[in-house]
Image (cartoon, helix red, strand yellow):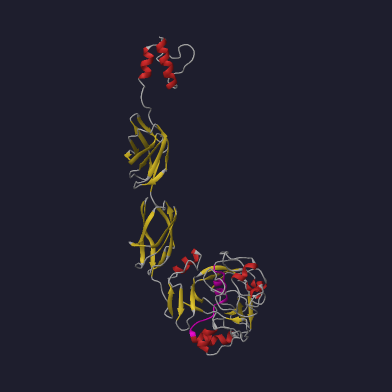
Amino acid sequence: MNHLRIILALLSFLFPTAIALGQGCSTDINGDGKVDGGDLALVLSNWGTCPPSVTSVTPTQGSVLGGTVITITGTGLSTTLAVTVGGAPCTAVTVLSPTQVRATTPPGAAGQAAVAVTTPAGTSLAPSPFNYVLQSVTSISPSSGPYTGGTPITISGQYLSGTTAVTIGGVPVTNLVVVNSTTVTAVTPPGSVGAADVVVTGSKGTVSVAGGFTYLSIITPAWATLLEASPDPAVVTSESLRTAITATGYAWRVRDNGTGIEMLLVPPGVFEMGCCFGGDLPLHSVTLTSAFYLGRYEVTQAQWQEKIGANPSYYQMSPQHPVEQVSWNTIQGFLSATGMRLPTEAEWEYACRAGTTTPFHSGPGFPNGTTDGNLVGQIAWYYYNTCSGGPGCQTMTVGGKAANALGLHDMLGNVWEWCGDWYGGYTSAPQTNPAGPGSGTSRVLRGGSWGNYTDNVRSEYRNNRMPSDADSSIGFRVARSL
């Protein structure tokens, strides 16, 4: 009996959960009132390897195609015989240590699947299931572009980090970049006019978006040569503006055949015109229903001289300075010779603002425009970087300052720009395609010049002069209708 007690005491040390040592007959395992061989037999009947125990599985999700390498952590794993996910056996099962096993998941249906580890001592389930996932696409932006290809697109969705290929209409995209698990960027290949399927393939499966991208027949006007069909994201940084430009079906950047003037497409839209000072009041809603082309730069002395044959400008530092000392009346001869026109005042302000609502349009570091007059020098030649601390009171070469969000340069500063309208007061009533009063005594000037202070180079600031007036601070920019 003493030997039996010694054996039971030893076993109770080895199996503390099965035997609790204490007073009296605590080693009476079978409860028959005796400590004897029956108790020892019961203990020895459970002798052997403990069953496995799983505490975690990482990662917790993977592709429905299988192939995800998972690491299982727990105890009693040194004799692992098999690992299953959703009842299907894993491959490449490797015991790393008594507490870790590595395996590769089999294919499985989207959703949750139980993870089980089997050893000679039994099978244990992981406390949390493994999630089989599919790639998904929630949006493609822009969703249309020219059939010639070259449109930068952004594909958004879930589980895109393993993307290996994207096709549109069966043709691979170029410049494929996996940004993160929810974003992929690419450039569209050439295609046929109409809707095309977008197929995204990756480590987590393949997803197809029927008609996800529409190829458009981009029109280049008969008077122009195509430079770029689609807006350059580095220039037109606003995705909404790029989408609006593309939706017109017209080329973004062209060169006028008769003058060599580079022009950019301004899409239709709605904006709040005016602001809060004097002649800028009252603020009112304006709708422009048609796209139009606007000169990327102010008309230069070289462009004027080629058509008119003489240069009236006071500041003749280079042919690429804006032409000035041109009256509204004088400009009509240039417009007649080229088939161009002046923008309306509403078109001018809409193009200048380019989606902003602040006094000064967008620039480097302030994509939504700014109210900070200290930043004006980045987007305009005006008093504080010409007359004061600059080269002197004079015009500057066009395009020397940062463009606005449509890619237009010198909309503020350098020279005042004539508009087509007679000058008159605003009303608060909403307007559609306004062209100004039917008559008047003076014509509208916009944008400010090299000699103006900050308040005069605001997007909404209005000025006016007699149509016969000419000045070294006044030039113009041309427009063309579609």
Residue 166, visible in the rendered structure: yes
Residue 150 position within the rendered picture, expressed as x and y whole percent measured from the top left: 40, 67
Residue 160 position within the rendered picture, expressed as x and y whole percent measured from the top left: 41, 53
Residue 429: in magenta span = no
**Number of marks in the rendered image:** 0
- The quarter of the picture where residue 81 lies is top left
For residue 124, above or below residue 38: below
Task: Report the span colored magenta.
Answer: 338-354
Residue 353: in magenta span = yes
For residue 249, above or below residue 298: above
Residue 17 position within the rendered picture, expressed as x and y whole percent measured from the top left: 44, 22
Q: Is 372 on the left-hand or right-hand side of 110?
A: right
Residue toward you, 149 or 395: 395
For residue 144, above or below residue 49: below
- The quarter of the picture where residue 462 lies is bottom right
Residue toward you, 106 or 238: 106
Locate the N terminus by quadrant.
top left
